[in-house]
Image (cartoon, rainbow, N blue to C red):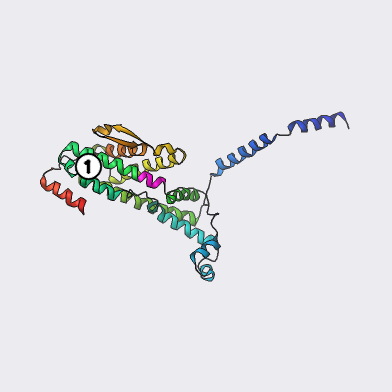
């Protein structure tokens, strides 16, 4: 063996990587690939045959409707996109009945401006806390998050456009329901949107939804956000109550948009109307 061959052999041995180095290179390379293509989620964990079995339907009928399983999963993606937001408890209805009873129990608070403000803040606090807990515990909500990732991984084409259309329609429907809910709440409490913002209840709903979703997503990695702390005098109230981070965020957003309507007169007739509305 020549001297040159010996040197080349030594160089090759020196370039041999340790297990740790090999592992790190693998991880770095995979990270680069993910950064280039994005991290995607799929329906690969679902078995078409298992779905047929659990549905209790004839395989022949299924294959007439979907000759290929990919066609079924395409329809499933569109159905998930259409239904997921409401099923995930993202429409603010988790504690609607409880909040209505709370408002009825404290109906005397409507007689003064301070009382109305305190009751409004309390309803926002409890409503946000209930909505956060419902979404945070919802399997459907996590499915909805994964659905967005799956959508991002779809190749450009008809399916991607159809899923995007379904997602868009579902989001707009959800936003409209949240907007109507807050519009009704504002009317009940004699509130209006701040004139200087030149905004709409649809824009308020978008802000509230984004705030809540941000907290729910963050809380998946930081469960401490679900915890509450006793605070006094929040938003100018004299009450001491348990406030969570999501409740603070949602209430702050809502109160930044809403102010008392100077055209509303709080007389006996209006109080009677409020009672009727809450009872209905």
- What's the residue at 28%, 45% (across, down)? 201
SS category of the residue bearing label 1: strand
Give the residues in magenta. Answer: 131-137
Q: Residue 126: percent from the left, percent from the top?
A: 30, 42
Left or right, residue 276 beside residue 138 = left
- Is residue 257 left or right of 1 when viewed as pictured? left
Q: Nearer the viewer, residue 260 or 153?
A: 260
Residue receiving disc 1 = 192
Q: Image check: 20 left or right of 216? A: right
Q: Quadrant of residue 48?
A: bottom right
Q: Is residue 3 above or below residue 165?
A: above
Magenta stretch holds residue 184: no
Q: Determine if the magenta segment contains residue 134.
A: yes
Q: Is residue 23 visible?
A: yes
Dividing the picture into quarters, in which one does residue 37 lie?
top right
Residue at the image position 34 percent from the left and 53 percent from the top: 173
Question: In x, y percent, where is residue 1?
Answer: 88, 32
């Amino acid at each position: 063996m020549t001297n040159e061959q010996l040197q080349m052999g030594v160089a090759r041995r020196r370039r041999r990587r340790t297990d740790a180095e090999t592992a790190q290179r693998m991880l770095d390379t995979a990270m680069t690939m993910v950064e280039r293509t994005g991290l995607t989620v799929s329906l690969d964990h679902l078995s078409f045959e298992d779905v047929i079995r659990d549905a209790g339907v004839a395989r022949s009928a299924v294959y007439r409707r979907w000759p290929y399983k990919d066609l079924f999963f395409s329809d499933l993606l569109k159905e998930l996109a259409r239904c997921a937001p409401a099923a995930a408890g993202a429409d603010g209805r988790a504690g609607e009945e409880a909040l209505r009873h709370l408002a009825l129990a404290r109906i005397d608070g409507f007689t003064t401006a301070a009382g109305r403000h305190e009751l409004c803040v309390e309803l926002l606090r409890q409503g946000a806390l209930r909505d956060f807990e419902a979404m945070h515990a919802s399997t459907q909500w996590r499915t909805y998050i994964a659905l967005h990732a799956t959508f991002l991984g779809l190749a450009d084409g008809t399916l991607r456009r159809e899923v995007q259309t379904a997602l868009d329609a579902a989001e707009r429907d959800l936003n409209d329901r949240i907007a109507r809910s807050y519009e009704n709440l504002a009317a009940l409490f004699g509130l209006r949107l701040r004139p200087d913002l030149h905004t709409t209840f649809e824009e308020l709903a978008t802000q509230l939804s984004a705030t809540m979703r941000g907290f729910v997503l963050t809380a998946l990695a930081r469960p401490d956000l679900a915890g509450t702390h006793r605070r006094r005098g929040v938003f100018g109230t004299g009450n001491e109550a348990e406030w969570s981070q999501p409740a603070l965020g949602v209430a702050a957003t809502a109160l930044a948009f809403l102010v008392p309507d100077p055209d509303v007169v709080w007389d006996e007739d209006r109080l009677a109307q409020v009672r009727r509305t809450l009872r209905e």
